[in-house]
Image: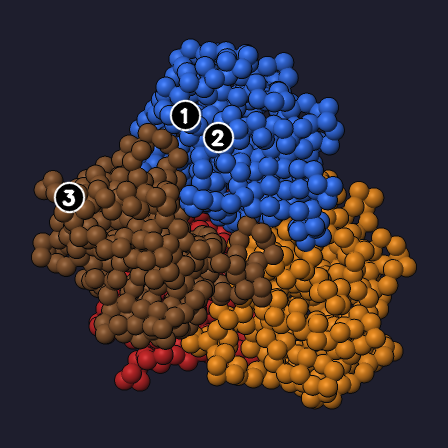
Chain colours: A orange, B brown, C red, D blue
Amino acid sequence: MSPEIARLGHVALETPDLDESLAFFGDTVGLEVVERTEGTAYLRAVEEWDHHSLSLTEADESGIDHIGWQTEEPEHVAAFAETFEDRGMDVTWVEAGAEAGQGGAIRFEVPNGHRFELYGEMAKPDAPAERRSRLKNRQYDPTDNGPVAPNRIDHLQIWDGDALQCAEWIQDELGYQVQEYYDLADGSRWGTFLSACGVKIDLAIVQSENEDDDAAVHHVAYEVDSANDLFEAHNVMNENRVPVDGIGQHGISRGEFMYARDPASGHRIEFNTGSYLTLDPHWEPVAWEENDISDGDDHQWIGGIDSLKRVTY
Amino acid sequence: MSPEIARLGHVALETPDLDESLAFFGDTVGLEVVERTEGTAYLRAVEEWDHHSLSLTEADESGIDHIGWQTEEPEHVAAFAETFEDRGMDVTWVEAGAEAGQGGAIRFEVPNGHRFELYGEMAKPDAPAERRSRLKNRQYDPTDNGPVAPNRIDHLQIWDGDALQCAEWIQDELGYQVQEYYDLADGSRWGTFLSACGVKIDLAIVQSENEDDDAAVHHVAYEVDSANDLFEAHNVMNENRVPVDGIGQHGISRGEFMYARDPASGHRIEFNTGSYLTLDPHWEPVAWEENDISDGDDHQWIGGIDSLKRVTY
Amino acid sequence: MSPEIARLGHVALETPDLDESLAFFGDTVGLEVVERTEGTAYLRAVEEWDHHSLSLTEADESGIDHIGWQTEEPEHVAAFAETFEDRGMDVTWVEAGAEAGQGGAIRFEVPNGHRFELYGEMAKPDAPAERRSRLKNRQYDPTDNGPVAPNRIDHLQIWDGDALQCAEWIQDELGYQVQEYYDLADGSRWGTFLSACGVKIDLAIVQSENEDDDAAVHHVAYEVDSANDLFEAHNVMNENRVPVDGIGQHGISRGEFMYARDPASGHRIEFNTGSYLTLDPHWEPVAWEENDISDGDDHQWIGGIDSLKRVTY
Amino acid sequence: MSPEIARLGHVALETPDLDESLAFFGDTVGLEVVERTEGTAYLRAVEEWDHHSLSLTEADESGIDHIGWQTEEPEHVAAFAETFEDRGMDVTWVEAGAEAGQGGAIRFEVPNGHRFELYGEMAKPDAPAERRSRLKNRQYDPTDNGPVAPNRIDHLQIWDGDALQCAEWIQDELGYQVQEYYDLADGSRWGTFLSACGVKIDLAIVQSENEDDDAAVHHVAYEVDSANDLFEAHNVMNENRVPVDGIGQHGISRGEFMYARDPASGHRIEFNTGSYLTLDPHWEPVAWEENDISDGDDHQWIGGIDSLKRVTY
């Protein structure tokens, strides 16, 4: 049986100032700091059970260390490793515990330079008693995390000099399903919106302006409850002097969004709500063409968020 | 020129446990404690400029000390006093500062036992620097007050053994405008919904089950931004083990609500949103009759909130 | 490979007055009528692609005809049929097209009397041009369906005289995953909250007051965008003289809800928002005990909605 | 006793295509058409009682005919007229009924070219029976007006070559109260935010880029219930191919907004929510300076909405 990937797990970011980045992602955004080791902090959202969906490591400059995906079963990690090695790819094993809370994992590069990690097991630590929700179906009482308190990691958007090639490799080798895609008037693919979990978009791969651009992460998105929360998040950012990149609704995915960036690292977070589930076992990708939505119709869906401000690996 | 009342200012409540009541109204509800003197704490909401809209005084048992209303001009206080004394009413002067932040005031009893206070001047203290909003048009950064953070005091609902007599006195002597009223099938007045400020309901006077019932306060209402906030408040109460009395929409006033009670004192707060403004200089009262809205249509508009649980003076 | 069920597809209801029930589910609730044949109407929500998630058939009295589930692959229908027949169960084949838009299907009884249907294929008809959304990732422009316009079917709640037996059969034979369950103080199982799709609750099975109660459906739930929409739906019901059964938040599933019933048939619909996804491939069921949430904490989570008002098969 | 103005009443707009403008303001926005005469349509919002808050008249090109304000008492109209004539201003009397539903009125020019109308009486026609709300405190059932259904007119923003002079005249001669103002770094006044009703901003006067710019209206704002409704309105505009000018939150007034323009006339509407009441009888204007909020903090508060796209008288 083929190994499978179950879902987006976490993103490992590098920041030149860990304390300031924690002030942003922890205090301002409202994520929970689960563990802090020498040089790295691990965070999760209030409705997450797994050890972390975000890690922040102090480094000389901002960057992406890797993007972590959980396999359907623990033994699928080795199965993927074997396949990749058979093709001559470089696969690095990460011992259990090297990344806090995580079982044995592999790391490798997806074309054209995106560093992926696959792991099968992740600890699910209890929230501290004073932070525990009274509801048994969530870990944290979210009412102490400010007015926003994102629920869970939702998706990543990455940019690539050959976005189509990158997306096709991920479809073919990792089995992600295409939910939507967008073609420019010249027939080229601008973006592919993929699902590892099979029921919603969790990875968007977008074409860089130049073929030579380095592989980069444009944003990591966390889900909030409603459009009202986007305005609450806007308010939180303004009160904390964090520049807001925009608020609006995407055509693709129908997600409503608010963007802000960590002042210390420049990593961008999207607060996201309103996207849909594809429970249909036979989902057919939604095909967009350039003129389906013009700038005038929904000026923020493309170009509205400064695409040059993204962080490379 | 006749003296006029400008608006509802505050309600002065008594509690058998000031610390616990502060834990409720301050930490759980999200009001700001502006000042605490021996035995009394003064609170205001994040969008209020005046010194307090709620005071809590430790006493042997729960009770209402008085309901405070601001006059249009400071000199109107004495003008009201003169009128009331001419009619042989008991009028008590309260010196400036006796109630923290407040100028000279009078207290007197409205039929049938409601203690009103009129004052003309109230301090507008600055929020502490670390709590000050970056926006110059509000005092506090509300994003530190939990997910709800009520904006401002909205209205009071009082119960009376002869609610019609009480309402008519307040119309005639204090000049409040009737916004809506509700008559039972037998022609008797069940409730009168009045406005001191002239643009929205700020005082509801409801008929008690028995004519001999003591004058009482059913709830004090604070405004929140939206129906979403009512669910947020519900969540906050559940996480803090505070019983919720109900959530829904009133027919009268069209206000959407969530009710909870201070565990220490039994005083009920309504989180309120969605009511309307009457900027019309010639507003005609809305006349409801008993069958206009039946229980089945809007089961919570009357009787849905336990009316016996109210606090007397 | 074992046959699998992919998701909840639809519920087939009977009503004594089809026109009136269509006025409710179509005009008031805001579902779309996709097709109407002699005696049966087929409806779907604005974000659904499949032919129907609700059918209404005129009958002498209100009732449930069947609950439809889609298999992962079309050929799984026959595989399930074979297994059931091997155990001596009655399995009825339904020809393709007998239920509009649907491929070949089987019907059978789950203990203790719930009529399930399994099908593998369902048509995905285009919305009429004048109703088509400009967004390619949804069929209908929802802004013509009133202020609520539910997105998609979310879950069913059924009641049973031996709810535990019913739930265990469904787990064992159909492979549904348990997301949460609730045990009474005497150790008996009150409710089991299952997932056919694997990522969210889509079937709740609750213990009837009496063991002899007939198998029944308590409600069918459709998802809306936010808590604000619950109040919008409340408003729509009041304006259309449809009694509202309650509005609030469940402890189990954390879903926020508003209930109303079709005046013609008594079938209850829940407008639902705010529940969570379990993308975790190793989800451990959430175990509730009777005292985890008391009536005072969240009075509507159990018993708040009149459980006697449910419709049998 | 000095004559007083009670509130903003309506705005009278000219459009080159009345039918298309009605398709926008009526069908898309969700205002109600109360009356249509030869060449003019009168509209009001679902929670308004007065005959109209917007009129649309077919003309050669888009323009503003006048802005209507209601006086506190009918006889104040003549009192204002007398004062203005004493100063040598041109005052034109408009007979009762010449503007549908309206009593006798005067029109005159405010510096530097804004056409104001003052009237004391306005009819309050009943909604048609089939459109009447079941709630006696509103005219229309809003659930038939799409997902947005603005409640009432909220404010106007006008632009002027000498905005300070214009604002001061309105303060001095018409008695409007200043709620907030904004000064540029060079000490000049960029905008004054005034209140005729005394409890909220209903007129904003903003400095044009050039002193010679004609007097113009930038937008008319209607209030909606919540930030969620702004996204609903965004959705409605996209589905109806109406370009959206932006969505966000203002610093001044704290109002959350969504802007769109009538495709036929170019008149801009703001959907607005979240602004505050100033019930304080001694409100002190909020004084902003240019650096209090920078572009980066809240990029949409100034300049974010294309100020050149405004319509002149």
As displayed, is residue A34 above or below residue A158?
below
Residue at the right extreme of this rendering = A212
Cβ atoms under marks 2 and 1 closer than 8 Å: yes
Give SS at disc 3: loop
**Which amino acid type corresponds to the residue marked 2 in the rendered image?**
Gly
Same chain shared by disc 3 and disc 2 = no
Residue shown at the point (24%, 58%) measured from the top left? B217
Residue designated by label 2: D175
Confirm or deny contact between disc 3 and disc 2 (CB under 8 A): no
x and y, in percent, of residue D305 in the image: 67, 39
Residue depicted at 69% across the width and 27% down the height: D161
**Image disc number at residue D2:** 1
The residue positioned 66% from the left and 68% from the top of the image is: A24
Q: Look at the picture and state if C135 lies above or below A271.
A: above
- Residue D23 visible: no
- Amino acid carrying label 1: it is Ser
